[in-house]
Amino acid sequence: MIAPANHRPADYSPKTALQKKLINRPRDVVTESLEGLALAYPNLLNIAYAPPVVWRKDAPVKGKVALISGSGSGHEPLNTGYVGRGMLDAACPGGLFTSPTPDQYVAAMHAVEGGAGALFITKNYTGGLLNMGMAKEMAEDEGFRVQTVLVNDDVAQNDPENRRAMGATVLVEKIAGAAAEESRPLDHVAAIAQQVADQARSMGLALTGCTSPRIGYPTFELPADEFELGVGIHGERGRQRRMLASADAMTEMMLEPIIQDLGLTEGDNVLALVSGLGATPLQELFIVFRHLHHSLAQRGIPVIRQLVGNYITSLDMAGCTITLLKLTPELTRLWDAPVHTAALHW
């Protein structure tokens, strides 16, 4: 999402704005970030640049379903940070907030498919759906078996067909990745992934806009005394703008629609993910999680698994997202299974 040029502040200066980011040239941000990732995790990852693909060092794993996911860059550690044992086999990073191209997915297939087919994890954004759909057709034309799972967990949109993908993406990738690691067939891995997508819901809020290196100023602005409830991870418009409130009150505003939409009741066990959007301190995320945990406990809904940190971001946006997954014993066991990626490992 890029703001039109006529929305630039009167005192906008590209040189001044770009000095506030640790970058060289805006056009090189994605490539240089991937180069740094390769140098930081040489024993874990392989990385190609034309087209850009990140894949696990030991791929292809014979007889294992390959999990392939992709998204625009700017949401790190999604998805490149989740490549490794027990999670993704490959990730396709697009340009900043731009979906990967079909040839990236096909290149990933050739790098990681081990004879058991592949699962494409699709986020509910128009460009991503179109490109992954074309990639599936191209891969199938080459003789590969491919299934897809759609992630659309954002309850800020009432119509499920229009719901954006948010934190459930991380949960789908981890749990389906664990199922694939057990050498389950493609149909089983796809069913597990769909179950996670169906039983997870998210809601976010923004305190500020995010600044793309390509333009050097925020994609949208919020008055100092307002926040946006239900914002998307690209800065898409949320449900409404409201007056700034306490952390507990704002957490409750995100939490209540999730509980209602999932139909959670007393005795349900959940996994809770609180993710920063890039610029919110971990200290504040723990304050959000504190209220979330207490509020669910008062409803008789125990949080038995949790993640708090920056797991799906929006460049340097201040704010956070909350994701709840209704757990079953099998989903809990798969969540607990070993994982070793750059961003998630136990």
Image (tube, rainbow, N blue to C red):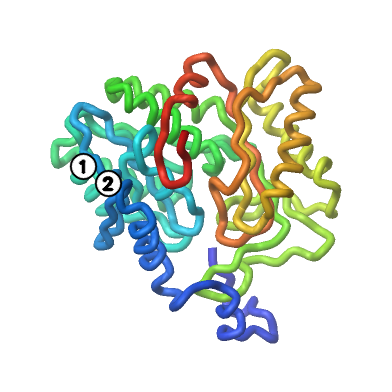
Residue 51 x %, y % = 26, 59
Label 1 SS: helix
Nearest the viewer among 45 and 293 is: 45
**Tags 2 and 1 touching, CB below 8 Å:** yes
Residue shown at the point (59%, 23%) measured from the top left: 326
Residue 117 x %, y % = 23, 31
Nearest the viewer among 266 and 332 is: 332
Specify the quadrant that holds the N terminus.
bottom right
Question: Is residue 99 in view from this perspective?
Answer: yes
Q: Is residue 171 above or below residue 78?
A: above
Crowd tier of the residue under label 1, counting other residues whose Cα lies within 10 Å: few below 14, some 14–19, many 20 or above? many
Q: Is residue 151 above or below residue 224?
A: above
Residue shown at the point (66%, 16%) measured from the top left: 268
Crowd tier of the residue under label 2, counting other residues whose Cα lies within 10 Å: few below 14, some 14–19, many 20 or above? many
Q: Is residue 88 left or right of residue 221?
A: left
Q: CA distance from mark 2 to mark 1?
A: 6 Å
Residue shown at the point (70%, 46%) measured from the top left: 285
Nearest the viewer among 80 and 254 is: 80
Question: Is residue 156 in view from this perspective?
Answer: no
Residue shown at the point (22%, 50%) measured from the top left: 107
Residue type, numbered disc 2:
Ala
What residue does disc 1 label? Answer: 139
Residue type, numbered disc 1:
Ala
Q: Quadrant of residue 263?
A: top right
Q: Which mark is residue 315?
A: none
Residue 306 x %, y % = 61, 32
Q: Is residue 135 left or right of residue 277?
A: left
Q: Is residue 324 left or right of residue 253?
A: left
What residue does disc 2 label? Answer: 135
